[in-house]
Amino acid sequence: MLRCCALLAAGTSEALTTLTARRRIRATATHARRRRIQLSAAKDDGATLPGATYEVLHEDDDILVVDKGAGLLFVPGRQPHKHDSLISRIKMTHGDEVGVAHRLDRDTSGVCVLAKTKAALRSLSIAFQERQVNKTYVGAVAGVPDVEGVIDGAIGKIMTPEGYNRVALVSEAEGGRAATTAYRVLETAEHSALLQLEPKTGRAHQLRVHLASIGHPLLGDALHGGAAHERLCLHSARLAFEHPSTKRPVAFESGAPFDATGAAPPR
């Protein structure tokens, strides 16, 4: 089980005190091509992976906050082999009223929130749509980027040579949607780094595409040129939002299950 703890592990606060002025990076489709981002299709069938699980962090009358494990589909797919998912498991224990206001990719772990009532679902859906939810991720990437920065780059879908749709940098003139990601380095290793990531927009695969576009793909992100790894090193570390019923600010956190090298940190 992933443990619920403060976002920044011991030893990272010192690194944050040395941050310099942010560098703003304008990512473009041409930029991504120069980096030779791999956009071919992944070879697995997209189903939940063996051993994938979850942990309940918080539950009240309105919401259920879960720490989702990597490899667990968020919602079920149409094919029978994709029926196993976080939502299908939760509905077995909590009933069909459980609603989805946002999602995490199958291979992304970490904090997510589900609604237990229709009123809570409406409130959470509006909060996510209007960017009133503060989302913080942690990711391990190839190479060591500038100590902090902001990545701007519109995101859309392209067709791969194999005939698959893939999310990539696409100019707004060609249908891409504006996207912005802020990052800062938390920890470094010889050939990789651990980053704190704050998506200012909520585009599909935004963090994966943006990091690959600047030459620092996430470890385990084979779809976008990342080095082979046992998992995608991307973790939803914190969600902060207004509680749909009490209207008070709440925040839920989970420590990243990997360090700057992608290995599990010492307990």
Image: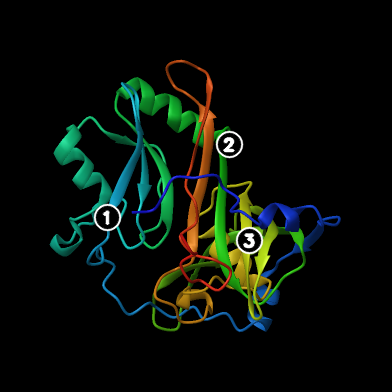
- In space, the residues marked 3 and 2 are separated at their CA atoms by 22 Å
| Mark pair 1, 3: CA separation | 24 Å
Q: Relative to the observer, which residue lies in front, 260 or 145? A: 260
Residue 194 image-quadrant placement: bottom right
Evaluate whether residue 169 shows in this view: no
Q: Which residue is mark 3?
A: 195
- Amino acid type shown at disc 2: Arg
Q: Earlier in the sequence, mark 3 or mark 2?
A: 2
The local crowd at label 3, few if under 14, some if 14 to 19, many if 20 or more residues have their Cα within 10 Å, is many
How many other residues sit within 10 Å of disc 1, few (<14), some (14-19) or many (≥20)? many
Instruction: Tell me if 148 is positioned left or right of 102 in this view.
Output: right
The quarter of the displayed image where residue 175 is located: bottom right
In this view, 210 is above or below 75: below
Q: Is residue 9 above or below residue 32?
A: above
CA distance for labels 2 and 1? 28 Å
Mark earlier in primary sequence (2, 1): 1
Q: What residue sits right under mark 2 in the picture?
A: 131
Q: Nearer the viewer, residue 129 or 138?
A: 138
The residue wearing badge 1 is: 53
User: How far across and down, in percent of the image, does residue 12 sit?
Assistant: 67, 56
The image position of residue 265, as x and y in percent, is: 49, 64
**Relative depth, front residue between 78 and 69:** 69
Residue 246 visible in the current orientation: yes
Going from N to C along the chain, the mark reached first, 1 or 3, is 1
Under circle 3, the secondary element is: strand
Determine whether 233 is above or below 42 in the image: above
Residue depicted at 82% across the width and 57% down the height: 18
Residue placed farthest to the front in the image?
A: 267
In the picture, measured across the screen, residue 129 lies left or right of residue 212, that is left
**Residue drawn where x is 76% and y is 63% of the image:** 147
